[in-house]
C-alpha cells in the first residue's frame, strides 16, 4: 500500500488547486479522479461550457451588434450543432491540458476511478485489481451532479439536465426550462438567443433571489424582451413523452395549463456527489442533498478529513471552490497563505445580459435597518456604452448614509462579470462615494459607470443632481 501525505478525492477546481498547493510545498499527494479527465463540472459540463456557449450564441446571432455599425447583422440559419459546440469543445480540451500539465509539474500521482473509504486513512479505488492507498490527510472534493425529480424521465434526447444539454445532436425548436436559478436563466437566454422558443418556469415570484431586487426586475425584463416566456409561481406536475420526435412533449403545469415543447431542460438544484465514498466507514454523514458539513477550516468531524467545493454546498462557485481547497491544505499542513476564504467575493451570472454583484443588496440594507442610499449609472449614458451600442445596462451602488461607505455593487449589462472586480476592491476596502467619484478611469471605458454612480449617490446625499 502506497502512503501519501494527502489524498484528494475529486479533480475539479477544489481538488486540483488543493493537490497543487500541497505538491508545491513538497507534500506527497495522490489525486483520485472518477473520470478519464480532470476538471470536474467546471470544465466539462458547468462553468466553462455554458459561458463559452453564451459567447458563441452572441457571435452567431449578432445580437449585440444589430444596427450598431449601420449594418443589421441577423441570426444566421446556416450554422450547425457542431458549430455551436466548437468553441466550447476547444476551451474544454485546452483547460484539461492545462490542468494535466499543472498536476504533472507538481508531481501529483493521479489515480482514475471512484475512490471510497476503507477506513479513516485508507482509500480504495475499484478496478482489476483494486488499488488501495493511504494518507495522513484526506480531502473530499467530489463536487455535485444535477438533481433528478421522480416525475421526469431523463432520456438524454429530449428531456435533459445541465449535463446532457451539452450533448445535443440537433437544436431544439422550443425549450421548456424548469427552474430559474443561475443554470436555468443562463440556458434560457442562450437558447433564446440562437432562435429557440423558450419558456422559463419558476416556483417562486422572482429569479435569483440572492440578487438585488432592482437588478432581477431588470433581468426579467431583458429576458422577456429576448423572447423568453417567464412563468412565476408555477410548477410542473408531469411531462408526457409521445416517443415520436415529430410530436411535442406535453408539459403539465399545476393549475391545468399544458405547454408543448420540443425539449425540456430541468435545472432546479444539484446534489453532492458522495455515492461512492462509503462515508459510513469513517463515521461521516451527508445531508438530504448529499452535502458534507465542515467547519471554517473545512474540517469534517473527523479531524484529518476535510471537504471543499460543491460537496459542502453554498456558495458553490468555481472561484470559491478553488480557494476552499487551498485554505484546507493551508490549515491541515499549517502553511502560509490562504488561511481563510476571502470575506468579500463576487457572483457572476452569465445570462444575456450578464449580471454580477458583490456585497450588500438594497433589501439586505433595509432588513438590517441601515440608513442607506443608492447611486446609479446607465451603460447607455457612458461614451463607451454609446460606442458599443449599449441600449440597456445599469451599475448600482448601495451605500451607508452619513459615512457614505459603499456596501454593495450590482451590475447588469455588457461586461458585468468583468466590471464587478473593481467593486470587490471598493467594498472590501470600505471605500466611500467620494473615493470612487474622485478616482480617474480611462475615458471612454465602462468603468466610468462607477464614477457617475458615485456622483449620483452624492447628489442624493446633497439633495441635488450633478454629473
Image (spheres, helix red, strand yellow):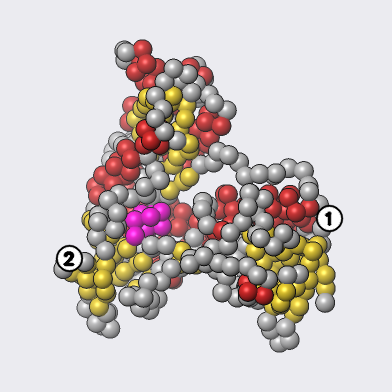
The stretch drawn in magenta includes residue 170: no
**Residue 412, above or below 89:** above
Q: Residue at x 69, y 56 (%)?
A: 18
In the rendered picture of this protein, how many numbered marks are placed on residues? 2
> Is 47 in front, or is 59?
47
Q: CA distance from mark 2 to mark 1?
A: 61 Å
| Helix, strand or loop: magenta stretch | helix
Q: Residue at x 39, y 30 (%)?
A: 369
Q: Residue at x 17, y 65 (%)?
A: 255
Image-quadrant location for residue 392 = top left
| Among the two numbered marks 2 and 1 on one chain, the one whose residue lies closer to the N terminus | 1
Compared across the picture, whether 94 is left or right of 159 comes to right
x, y percentage for residue 13?
61, 57
Q: Which residues are magenta?
A: 179-187
Image-quadrant location for residue 166 = bottom left
x, y percentage for residue 354?
40, 45
Question: Which of the numbered marks, if any, corresponds to residue 255?
Answer: 2
**Residue 114, above or below 303:** below
Q: Is residue 394 visible?
A: yes
Query: Mark 1 sits on what residue?
Result: 26
x, y percentage for residue 262?
27, 71
Compared across the picture, whether 423 is left or right of 236 comes to right
Q: Is residue 39 visible?
A: no
Nearest-to-viewer mark from 2 and 1: 2
Compared across the picture, whether 466 is left or right of 246 comes to right
Quarter of the picture containing the N terminus is bottom right
- Kind of element beneath mark 1: loop
x, y percentage for residue 320?
58, 49
Amino acid at each position: 500500500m502506497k502512503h501519501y501525505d494527502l489524498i484528494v478525492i475529486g479533480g475539479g477546481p477544489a481538488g486540483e488547486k488543493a493537490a497543487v498547493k500541497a505538491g508545491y510545498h513538497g507534500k506527497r499527494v495522490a489525486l483520485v479522479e472518477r473520470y478519464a479527465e480532470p476538471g470536474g463540472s467546471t470544465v466539462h459540463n458547468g462553468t466553462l461550457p455554458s459561458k463559452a456557449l453564451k459567447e458563441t450564441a452572441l457571435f452567431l446571432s449578432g445580437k449585440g451588434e444589430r444596427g450598431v455599425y449601420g449594418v443589421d447583422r441577423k441570426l444566421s440559419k446556416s450554422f450547425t450543432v457542431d458549430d455551436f459546440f466548437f468553441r466550447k469543445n476547444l476551451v474544454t480540451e485546452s483547460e484539461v491540458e492545462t490542468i494535466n500539465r499543472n498536476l504533472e509539474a507538481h508531481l501529483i500521482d493521479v489515480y482514475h476511478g471512484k475512490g471510497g473509504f476503507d477506513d479513516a486513512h485508507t482509500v480504495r479505488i475499484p478496478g482489476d485489481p483494486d488499488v488501495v492507498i493511504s494518507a495522513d490527510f484526506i480531502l473530499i472534493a467530489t463536487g455535485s451532479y444535477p438533481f433528478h425529480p421522480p416525475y421526469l424521465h431523463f432520456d438524454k434526447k429530449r428531456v435533459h439536465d445541465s449535463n446532457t444539454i451539452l450533448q445535443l445532436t440537433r437544436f431544439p425548436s422550443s425549450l421548456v426550462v424548469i427552474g430559474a436559478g443561475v443554470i436555468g436563466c443562463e440556458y434560457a437566454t442562450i437558447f433564446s438567443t440562437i432562435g429557440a422558443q423558450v419558456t422559463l418556469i419558476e416556483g417562486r415570484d422572482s429569479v435569483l433571489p440572492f440578487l438585488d431586487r432592482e437588478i432581477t426586475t431588470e433581468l426579467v425584463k431583458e429576458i422577456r424582451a429576448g423572447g423568453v416566456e417567464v412563468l412565476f409561481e408555477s410548477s410542473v406536475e408531469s411531462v408526457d413523452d409521445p416517443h415520436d420526435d415529430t410530436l411535442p412533449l406535453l408539459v403539465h403545469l399545476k393549475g391545468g395549463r399544458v405547454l408543448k415543447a420540443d425539449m425540456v431542460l430541468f435545472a432546479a438544484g444539484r446534489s453532492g456527489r458522495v455515492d461512492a465514498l462509503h462515508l459510513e466507514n469513517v463515521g461521516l454523514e451527508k445531508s438530504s442533498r448529499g452535502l458534507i458539513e465542515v467547519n471554517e477550516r473545512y474540517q469534517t468531524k473527523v479531524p484529518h478529513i476535510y471537504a471543499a467545493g460543491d460537496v459542502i454546498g453554498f456558495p458553490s462557485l468555481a472561484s470559491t471552490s478553488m480557494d476552499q481547497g487551498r485554505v484546507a491544505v493551508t490549515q491541515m499542513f499549517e502553511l502560509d497563505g490562504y488561511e481563510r476564504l476571502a470575506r468579500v467575493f463576487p457572483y457572476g451570472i452569465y445570462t444575456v445580459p450578464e449580471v454580477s454583484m458583490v456585497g450588500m443588496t438594497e433589501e439586505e440594507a433595509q432588513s438590517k435597518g441601515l440608513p442607506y442610499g443608492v447611486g446609479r449609472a446607465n451603460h447607455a449614458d457612458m461614451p463607451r456604452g454609446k460606442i458599443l451600442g449599449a441600449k440597456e445596462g445599469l451599475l448600482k451602488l448601495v451605500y451607508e448614509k452619513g459615512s457614505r461607505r459603499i456596501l454593495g455593487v450590482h451590475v447588469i449589462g455588457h461586461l458585468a462579470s468583468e466590471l464587478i472586480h473593481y467593486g470587490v476592491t471598493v467594498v472590501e476596502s470600505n471605500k466611500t462615494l467620494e473615493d470612487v467619484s474622485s478616482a480617474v478611469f480611462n475615458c471612454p471605458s465602462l468603468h466610468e459607470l462607477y464614477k457617475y454612480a458615485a456622483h449620483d449617490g452624492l447628489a442624493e446625499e446633497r439633495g441635488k443632481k450633478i454629473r
